[in-house]
Image: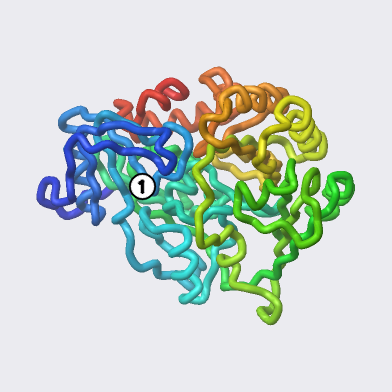
C-alpha cells in the first residue's frame, strides 16, 4: 500500500456549486450538500477532500445516482465522480486495466472491446459508474462467477486525511475491505480490474413452466456460464414493467422467462457486453426494487416461498421476480462473502403500498440469512449487519485507519456502521 501527495492543484479548481439539490434517478433520495464538487482529475479530488478535512465537513462520493438506498445524501460535501473518466489501457502481461472511477459500465465495455478485451461479469443494467457498481456489490448472474467487485485487483482512493492511497494485491486485508466499501474508506478515483480476452456469447431464451424451472434448476446452473430466470405473475408483466416482449403465442402468467449465455466462437454470438445487460432504447418507468442474497443451497425453497408470497398476499403486484446467482467472494461487505448465493429481486411502482410489500419480503427472507444488495432497498439495521457479516470487524479495522474521524459517514451509514 502506498501513500502519495499529488501535485498541488489550485483550491477548488473543480466546479463547485453551493446548496444544489442532489437526487437519485428516482427522486426518492435527496439532499442539499453545502458543496457539490465535480473533480476532473485526481489532484482536484485530493484538494476537495482536503478542503473538507480542514473544515471538518462530511464527505460522500456519488456516481450516476442509480442506487435506491440512501448512500449518497449528505449536508456536507458531495463529490460527484462522473467527470473522472479517460482512456483505459490494458496491461497485456496481467490482463488488468486501470479504470477511472466515473467511467460508465456501458462505455467501459466498448472501450475494452476495442482494445481486445471484455469484462468477465456485469449487471443487468449498465448505466452506473464502474465504482458505483462495484462499491455496492452489483452483480450479474452465473453460479461460477463472482460479482463485479470480485475482479478488482487494485484501488486508488483519497482517504479521510486527504491522502492519495493505492491498494494492490499485496495488501490483501485492505483490498478485501475496498472491493465493496460503500464509499466509507474514501473517494475512489481509479480501480484496477481483471479482464479477459474479448469473447462472444450465445444467448438462449426460454419460457418454461414454473415446475419445469424448478425441476431443471440444478442442471441449468451447471450447464451455462450465465443463467437467470424471471417469474412473471401476469401475462403482461414483462412488457409492462421491463419492456421485454412476451414470446409470441405464450401466456406468460405464472411462467418463467429464462436466460442463458455461453461462450461462442462469434459466428452465432454477440459481444459479451452487448447481451449481459438489458440494452433497451427506452428505460423502464421509475420503480422501487429490493434485492437480497441468500444461500444457493436453498434456491428452490426460496424461489417457491417468494412466488407464494406474491400469489397469496400481493396478487396485484405486476413486477416479475428476478432470480440470479453468484459465486462467493472474499470482500468483507459483499452480499456474497464466502457464500455461493441466489439473489431474489422484486419491484414495485411508487405510491402503490410498496412499503408494506417490501416489509413482507424482508420478513420472509429474514429466515434465510438474507444479505442486501447495498444499492437497492433493504430493511436491515445495525444488529442485522453485525449478525450477517462475520468479517465486519475486519472491515471496521480498515475503515477506522483510513477514515479515523468518520468523514465519509452519512446518517444512514452511521446508523449501520458508525
Q: Which residue, as the protein is rendered here, is positioned at the far bottom?
A: 267
Q: Quadrant of residue 397?
A: top left
Q: Nearer the viewer, residue 406 or 319?
A: 319
Residue 271 shown left or right of residue 298 in the figure: left
Q: Which residue is mark 1?
A: 188
From the top left corner, tell me how far across and down residue 101 is, in percent.
Answer: 37, 53
Q: Is residue 215 above or below residue 392?
A: below
Image label count: 1
Residue 221's spot in the image, x, y percent?
A: 78, 53
Q: Can residue 318 be spotted in the picture?
A: yes
The residue at the point 84 percent across, 48 percent down is 213
Q: Residue at x 48, y 52 (%)?
A: 169
Find numbered disc 1 in the image and state the secondary structure of the residue it sits on: strand
Is residue 51 shown above or below 382?
A: below
- Left/right placement of residue 297 relative to residue 342 reads right
Q: Quadrant of residue 26?
A: top left
Above or below, comparing residue 76 to residue 252 in the picture: above
Outermost residue, left side: 10
Q: Nearer the viewer, residue 305 or 193?
A: 305
The residue under the point 61% across, 32% down is 371
Can you see residue 337? no
Amino acid at each position: 500500500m502506498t501513500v502519495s501527495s499529488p501535485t498541488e492543484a489550485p483550491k477548488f479548481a473543480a466546479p463547485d456549486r453551493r446548496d444544489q439539490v442532489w437526487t437519485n434517478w428516482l427522486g426518492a433520495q435527496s439532499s442539499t450538500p453545502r458543496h457539490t464538487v465535480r473533480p476532473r482529475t485526481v489532484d482536484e479530488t485530493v484538494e476537495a477532500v482536503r478542503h473538507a478535512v480542514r473544515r471538518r465537513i462530511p464527505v460522500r462520493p456519488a456516481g450516476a445516482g442509480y442506487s435506491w438506498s440512501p448512500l449518497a445524501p449528505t449536508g456536507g460535501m458531495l463529490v460527484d465522480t462522473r467527470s473522472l473518466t479517460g482512456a483505459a489501457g490494458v496491461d497485456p502481461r496481467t490482463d488488468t486495466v486501470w479504470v477511472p472511477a466515473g467511467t460508465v459500465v456501458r462505455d467501459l465495455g466498448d472501450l475494452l472491446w476495442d482494445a481486445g478485451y471484455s469484462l468477465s461479469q456485469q449487471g443487468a443494467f449498465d448505466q452506473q459508474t464502474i465504482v458505483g457498481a462495484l462499491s455496492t456489490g452489483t452483480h450479474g448472474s452465473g453460479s461460477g462467477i463472482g460479482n463485479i467487485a470480485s475482479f478488482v485487483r487494485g484501488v486508488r482512493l483519497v482517504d479521510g486525511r486527504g491522502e492519495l492511497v493505492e491498494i494492490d494485491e499485496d495488501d490483501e486485508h485492505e483490498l478485501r475491505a475496498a472491493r465493496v466499501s460503500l464509499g466509507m474508506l474514501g473517494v475512489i478515483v481509479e480501480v484496477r480490474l481483471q479482464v479477459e480476452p474479448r469473447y462472444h456469447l450465445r444467448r438462449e431464451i426460454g419460457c418454461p413452466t414454473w415446475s419445469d424451472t424448478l425441476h431443471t434448476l440444478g442442471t441449468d446452473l451447471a450447464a451455462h456460464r450465465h443463467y437467470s430466470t424471471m417469474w412473471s405473475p401476469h401475462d403482461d408483466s414483462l412488457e409492462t414493467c421491463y419492456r421485454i416482449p412476451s414470446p409470441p403465442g405464450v401466456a406468460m402468467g405464472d411462467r418463467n422467462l429464462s436466460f442463458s449465455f455461453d461462450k461462442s466462437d462469434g459466428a452465432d454470438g454477440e459481444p459479451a457486453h452487448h447481451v449481459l445487460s438489458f440494452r433497451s432504447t427506452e428505460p423502464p418507468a421509475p420503480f422501487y426494487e429490493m434485492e437480497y442474497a441468500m444461500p444457493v443451497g436453498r434456491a428452490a425453497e426460496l424461489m417457491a416461498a417468494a412466488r407464494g408470497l406474491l400469489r397469496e398476499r400481493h396478487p396485484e403486484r405486476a413486477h416479475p421476480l428476478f432470480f440470479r446467482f453468484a459465486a462467493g467472494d472474499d470482500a468483507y461487505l459483499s452480499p456474497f462473502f464466502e457464500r455461493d448465493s441466489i439473489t431474489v429481486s422484486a419491484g414495485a411502482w411508487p405510491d402503490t403500498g410498496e412499503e408494506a410489500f417490501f416489509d413482507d419480503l424482508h420478513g420472509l427472507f429474514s429466515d434465510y440469512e438474507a444479505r442486501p444488495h447495498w444499492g437497492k432497498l433493504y430493511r436491515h439495521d445495525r444488529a442485522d449487519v453485525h449478525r450477517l457479516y462475520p468479517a465486519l470487524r475486519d472491515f471496521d479495522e480498515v475503515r477506522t485507519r483510513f477514515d479515523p474521524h468518520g468523514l465519509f459517514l452519512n446518517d444512514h451509514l452511521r446508523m449501520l456502521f458508525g
